[in-house]
Amino acid sequence: MTDVTDGVLHTLFHSDQGGHEQVVLCQDRASGLKAVIAIHSTALGPALGGTRFYPYTSEEEAVADALNLSRGMSYKNAMAGLDHGGGKAVIIGDPELIKSEALLLAYGRFVASLGGRYVTACDVGTYVADMDVVARECRWTTGRSPENGGAGDSSVLTAFGVFQGMRASAQHQWGDPTLRGRKVGIAGVGKVGHHLVQHLLEDGAEVVITDVREESVRRILDRHPAGVTAVADTEALIRTEGLDIYAPCALGGALNDDSVPVLTAKIVCGAANNQLAHPGVEKDLADRGILYAPDYVVNAGGVIQVADELHGFDFDRCKAKAAKIFDTTLAIFARAKEDGIPPAAAADRIAEQRMAEARRR
Ligand SMILES: NC(=O)c1ccc[n+]([C@@H]2O[C@H](COP(=O)([O-])OP(=O)(O)OC[C@H]3O[C@@H](n4cnc5c(N)ncnc54)[C@H](O)[C@@H]3O)[C@@H](O)[C@H]2O)c1
């Protein structure tokens, strides 16, 4: 047994970060499927979380990722007020090379075998079309296309939720929820980022964007010739003079020992998952007087949307739920102030409280 395996098993059974209810290793040699389904908690209801399809360098790394991501979903779902616990699945391998109908169907059978304890959805490397295939074998599948009873692309409500989180942050920091006249920098104008640009412009903000893909930047500048400017990279974006808000909407780890000391913004609020590179960064932000809206709180619009698919999707109902991200974010800032802790820690406390109360019932 390797050290990494020891680490994973220790996390699962002994660490404060662990305490998962169930971890399932799945294999279908015929299609090449190797997957890990991790159920962190069903305290609030069936575990809900997406399927990541990724070329992990080892099986141990995949298990560790499934444990980490599923735990994160417990907190996200609890904070979003959903009656769902946290779960996540990872499929090991390069989706470009091994993804096939047979593999996705085999995966669907494994998810179905859990009898609804885990409900799946899209994540990195899986798309609406893939969930349509998985759904043929498994009724506990969300993230499907509208033609197949799903809600389609979740980025619309994710962006709307992030916008609500930004309004709440502005209210807390400056006493007014409007973003009119504020300068907002978005790193990553993909599916979520480009909808966010739209919300900000409608509210009268000035938007600065960057993206590693030139065509993504071009698409925004062509669509919005006024009110949007582009900078070369994230490094330039976070140092932009007069920036009020920084919205990381690309990959995780945006807030780290290099970026936090040079941020010009007074608020960080974006869609990317796992923005804090390591424990302690939330305190560095607070020490610099930068208000951090916890990522899993403000980016919950997507999970709110997929959860709704289980009840027959209704866009207006979901939008009303995603609008509550405004109040939730304000409540977190208030709790942080009251307890003298950073907002990220306050969010964790509130989520843990909700799960503990559900367990006692
Ligand atoms: N789509 C959703 O509903 C949803 C829900 C919750 C969280 N998120 C998270 O939000 C983030 C964005 O999601 P998305 O669906 O828009 O993804 P996406 O892939 O459509 O967009 C990401 C964009 O970031 C760009 N990018 C990558 N690396 C970059 C870098 N170093 N600097 C600048 N730009 C970079 C990419 O080129 C791309 O345009 C991800 O972290 C995702 O996990 C998305």
Image (cartoon, rainbow, N blue to C red):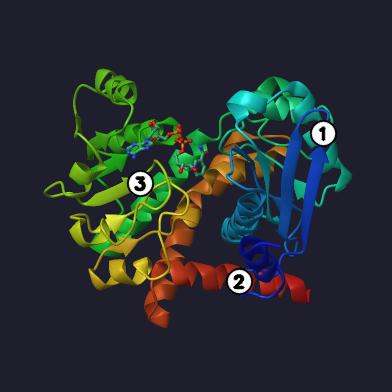
Please report contact status of discs 1 and 3: CB closer than 8 Å, yes or no.
no
| Residue 70 can be seen in this image | yes
Dot 1 alpha-carbon crowd within 10 angstroms: few under 14, some 14 to 19, many 20 or more: few
Quadrant of residue 312 within the rendered picture: top right
Inspect the image, locate mark 1, and give the three-letter code of the amino acid beneath it.
Arg
Residue assigned mark 3: 248
Secondary element type, mark 3: strand
Secondary element type, mark 1: loop
Q: Which numbered disc covers residue 131?
A: none
Inspect the image, locate mark 2, and give the three-letter code of the amino acid beneath it.
Glu
| Residue 149 can be seen in this image | no
* In the image: residue 45, left or right of residue 230: right
Quadrant of residue 228 within the rendered picture: top left
Q: Indicate the position of residue 298 as horizontal and vertical percent values.
A: 46, 52
Q: Earlier in the sequence, mark 2 or mark 3?
A: 3
**Mark 3 beta carbon near ligand 1 (under 8 Å):** yes
* In the image: residue 164, left or right of residue 355: left
Spatial CA distance of label 1 from label 3 is: 39 Å
Spatial CA distance of label 2 from label 1 is: 39 Å
* Viewport quadrant of the C terminus: bottom right
